[in-house]
Amino acid sequence: MPIKRWIPHPVKQALKHRISDWRFNRAFAAFRRAPRLALSNRDLLGELRRGWGNEGWAADTEYLEVVLERALALRGPVLECGSGLSTLLVGAIAEHEGMELWTLEHHPGWFDCVRKQLNRYALRSTRLILAPIEDYGEFSWYRPPLEDMPGRFTLVICDGPPGDTPGGRYGLLPVMRERLSATAEILLDDTSRPAEARIARRWGQESGATVTFLGRDNGFASIKLGG
């Protein structure tokens, strides 16, 4: 009868982490070599999400596919609200295509975690900004370094701040409107939640933007400025 070897829990966890890191590194290398080809490979995107190890908070694969597709199609700087797996993947596209990604993150611990990964893969076209949540009166939102930022973002990836922030993600448009291209597109995640869906519709009403709900159960939305 075989003897079952007992492995201490910390050793199991360390081994699991090393395997997950190896899987992510392999998948990310494949994505980075050919982002356009990788976009059509759902298995690879799934491997990246699993290897990232934060699946509960990582962008849904369907939303991630649209984000990457737009990043590859559009030219000009990209703004991201909330950091994560998409920061690395769009950051790799930014390196490949010669553009800039600006990412706002309010949580210091998570900021450090993502910054380490950006440094690890030498993604120099990504500007990760520690931007605390600030009270603007009617709503709260990030405090971005507006004086240093590009004048015309063509794409916004909006997956933050957290839903319990006063006003939710509404502050993006009033705070950043003058920094967005007249035809910029905002990809707003989590519109299956009533609060985010209301924000998308409000942006449409206040700016004249075209709002289209996409994904399974209207899980995210495209808001195109300029109608």
Image: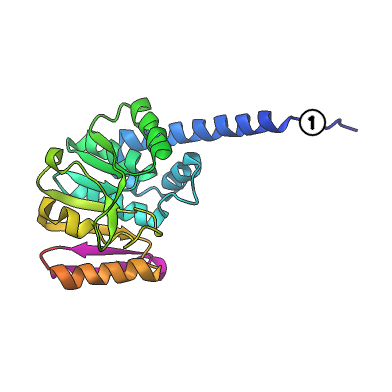
Where's residue 100, x and y in %?
19, 38
Query: What residue is rendered at 27% in x and 67% in y?
Result: 200
The image quadrant where one finds the C terminus is: bottom left
Task: Please determine whether, in this image, residue 73 is positioned above or below residue 225.
Answer: above
Would you place residue 98 above or below residue 61 in this image? above
Residues 213 and 149: in front is 149
Q: Which color scheme does this rendered protein use?
A: rainbow
Task: Report the residue at 34% width, 27% height from top.
Answer: 119
From the image, tell me which residue sits under label 1: 6
The residue located at (19%, 70%) in the rendering is 204
- List x then y, in percent, for residue 202: 23, 71
Specify the amino acid type for callout 1: Trp
Judged left or right of residue 206, residue 80 is right
Query: Label 1's element?
Result: loop
Query: Magenta region: which residues?
Result: 208-224
Q: Quadrant of residue 216?
A: bottom left
Q: Nearer the viewer, residue 227 or 144?
A: 144
Q: Is residue 192 left or right of residue 143?
A: right
Looking at the picture, tell me which residue is in the foreground, 144 or 97.
144
The residue sitting at 26% across, 39% down in the picture is: 93
Residue 122's x, y, as percent? Answer: 31, 26
**Residue 59 % position (x, y):** 40, 52
